[in-house]
Image (spheres, rainbow, N blue to C red):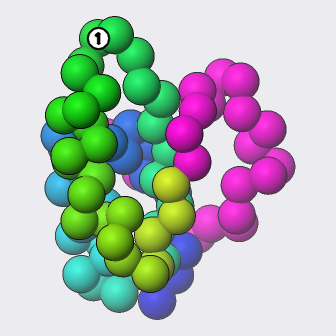
Amino acid sequence: MSRVLVTGAAGFIGSHLVDRLLEMGHEVTGVDCFTDYYPEGAKRHNLSKALAHKRFHFVEGDLLRLNLESLPTTRAVFPP
């Protein structure tokens, strides 16, 4: 399968998308930042299944401030 990038990976929709993509056999890079808008504990819980998966890589950060060239090359980007 291919490598995909999911932005907002720790949110409710993003985390479910990450889990499904992993089930389908994709390698997934998830990007999210933890803000006061959404409880950090809830976001970390949303990612708990994915973080234990060998084909998941999590990058904590704001897309506006990340060096996007440091992210792995992907075949698709999913913004939930």
Range covered by the magenta-colored residues: 59-80
- Which SS class for mark 1? loop
Of 12 and 40, the residue lying toward us: 40
Q: Which residue lies most toward the top here?
A: 36
Q: Residue at x 75, y 43 (%)?
A: 68
59, above or below 1, in the image: above
Horizontal relation, residue 18 to residue 13: left or right: right
| Closest to the observer, 76 or 41 | 41
- Is 72 rendered above or below residue 40? below
Q: Is residue 55 above or below residue 46?
A: below
Image quadrant where residue 42 sits: top left
> Residue visible at 50% across and 55% down?
58
- Horizontal relation, residue 39 to residue 64: left or right: left
Which quadrant is the C terminus positioned in?
top left
The prevailing secondary structure element of the residues shown in magenta is loop
Q: Position of residue 18 (x, y in %)?
A: 31, 61
Viewer-proximal residue among 52 and 4: 52
